[in-house]
Image (tube, rainbow, N blue to C red):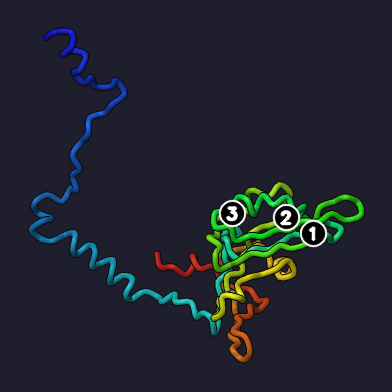
Amino acid sequence: MNQTEATNKPHASANSTPVEKSDSGQGWIGWVFFSDLFAGLRLTFKYMFAKHITMQYPDIEKWQPYSRFRGHHFLLKDEQGDIKCVACELCAKICPSQCIEVIPYEDENGDRHPEVFDIDMGRCLYCGLCEDACPVDAIAMGSHFEFSTYSSKDLLVNKATLLAMPGKTEKGGVVIPASFNSDETVTVTAKNEKGYHWWDAIHR
């Protein structure tokens, strides 16, 4: 073997481990008697006769999302009650779908504030980049997710709507009592009562 062949020949790494063939442990006995099939059927019948955990949404109960849930946007205020946004327009620039429009203005003290802060929820990807890019933590994505509508014009929200939106839930994953109302606008109102965690109801 010459030097060129020795160079082109692949060498095994010192840290590499040999690949072992997967063995299910069943062998030919499990293949003949369909042990995998019966194991799957046993799990199916186990859940078939278990307690049902279907959530009665929206008539009776409602699920509260976790704090990491990316729902409807909302704007925050500072301790003085003023909007925290400084109209730097970073959220509008980083938005991949360009659904945020911010028009700034300066007050008599020279501080910047948003005169217009509009978000087109129909174009939003709910990626959360606007929340990450904000230097003053003025915009965030809350737990509100029930804002479907028949008109795309209703999905264009302004600054006043964003300031009135609820924030993040303190305790997520809880199913609480609720009531469904379809008289004028379809809404699901949560009652201020103690609920149960959805994970506790799963049969394990």
Give the residue pinned by disc 2: 138
Kind of element beneath mark 3? loop
Percent position (x, y) of residue 33? 10, 60
Task: Name which residue lies at 39% across and 64% down.
Answer: 204
Instruction: First in sequence, mark 2 or 1: give its number.
Output: 1
Q: Do the residues labelled 2 and 1 touch (CB within 8 Å)?
A: yes
In the image, residue 24 lies at what x, y percent? 19, 48
Say which residue appears at 65% left-offset and 53% top-offset.
Answer: 91
Residue in view at x 22 percent, y 34 percent = 19
Q: What residue type is labelled 2?
A: Ala
Mark 2 packing: few (<14 Cα in 10 Å), some, or many (20+)? some
Amino acid type, callout 1:
Ile
Name the disc covering residue 83, or none: 1
158 displayed left or right of 28: right
Residue 169 appears in the rendering: no
Q: In this view, does 18 lie above or below 145?
A: above
Q: What residue type is labelled 3?
A: Cys
Q: Earlier in the sequence, mark 2 or mark 3?
A: 3
Q: Which of the 4 quarters of the picture holds residue 171?
A: bottom right
**From the viewer's perspective, is 124 left or right of 48?**
right
Disc 1 residue crowd, few under 14, some 14–19, many 20+, Cα 10 Å: some
Q: Are marks 3 and 1 in contact (CB under 8 Å)?
A: no
Which residue is most to the right?
108
Q: Which residue lies furthest to the bottom in this view?
A: 183
Say which quadrant the N terminus sits in. Answer: top left
Which numbered circle lies on residue 95?
A: 3
For marks 3 and 1, the one nearer the N-term is 1
